[in-house]
Amino acid sequence: MINQDTTISVKNLEVSYGMIKAIKGISFEFKSGEITALIGSNGAGKTTTLKALSGLLPHSGEVLFNHQNISALDAPARLKYKMALCPEGRGIFPNLTVTENLMLGAYLEKSKAKVNELIEQQFTMFSRLAERRKQVAGTLSGGEQQMLAIARALMSEPKMLMLDEPSLGLAPVIIEQIFQKFEDLRQRGLGLLIVEQNAHLALEVSAKAYVLETGAITLNGKGSDLLSDPRVVEAYLT
Ligand SMILES: Nc1ncnc2c1ncn2[C@@H]1O[C@H](COP(=O)(O)OP(=O)(O)O)[C@@H](O)[C@H]1O
Ligand SMILES: [Mg+2]
């Protein structure tokens, strides 16, 4: 249980690829104990935003962890601030076993006993992974690979977990199981930022949501309000 509240505030974030500005000065925030959604179509800038937040892309603007400006920190340093990214396409190592993939998620942790304890925590949460602990990750189903990617992100004991299109390519019944885990994590006090093209699902589970269109936030509000907003319905839900 995490009892200290955390807010990540993003202010005027700008990210460019060469001459092209992919993110054009967006501001949003997400908090511990809440699910926040960032929805947008393909190419809107969702992945770029998460990479910048994780310290994987240079950006201007501010990323504030509570009130501390962490904009100048690189990705490993941001992990120490308990922010973890579960990347698009999952980024697991197909030739390594489930357990080995999990170990890599705790590469900053020096204590072997602690690493083992963290691995067992993931196996408690994801029993399907426990049954497959010695299996190479490339032979897992899509849903199991997504669970492994989430579990690996949790190995750094994040307070704030950012997920890039966790539902992509998965069957509805598996998506439901995975989103149930997100709700469990939220109840334990984690803050989740879920980035999705699957707007319906993301808006249903989120307290707060933002709509990203070609690098700018065009709408924001309660997830439930956006679900019935005619502009959202027309552009994302029909
Ligand atoms: N490495 C890159 N180099 C140049 N342009 C990129 C690169 N990655 C993404 N882009 C561009 O930035 C925009 C946003 O991409 P991205 O963040 O991947 O969108 P999303 O995740 O919402 O689909 C797109 O126009 C994309 O073509
Ligand atoms: Mg993307």
Image: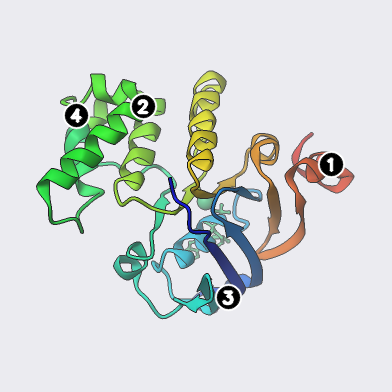
The furthest residue to the left: 112
SS for callout 3: strand
Residue at left offset 25%, top offset 30%: 138
Vertical position of residue 211 compared to residue 155: above or below: below
Residue 28, quarter of picture: bottom right
Task: Where is residue 123? Give x, y as percent.
Answer: 28, 29
Task: Where is residue 156? Give x, y as percent.
Answer: 30, 52
Question: Marks 2 and 3: in contact by CB < 8 Å?
Answer: no
Where is mark 4, residue-wise? 136
Residue at left offset 54%, top offset 65%: 8
Where is mark 2, residue-wise? 144
Where is mark 3, residue-wise? 14
Instruction: Report, in whole angstroms, how far the alpha carbon at label 4 lies from the one at label 1.
Output: 43 Å
SS for callout 1: helix
Residue at left offset 52%, top offset 61%: 6
Task: Where is residue 140? Give x, y as percent.
Answer: 30, 25
Judge from the rendering whether residue 33 lies leftward or rightward of residue 135; answer left or right: right
Question: Marks 4 and 2: in contact by CB < 8 Å?
Answer: no
Q: Which amino acid type is marked by label 1?
A: Glu
Vertical position of residue 180 compared to residue 208: above or below: above
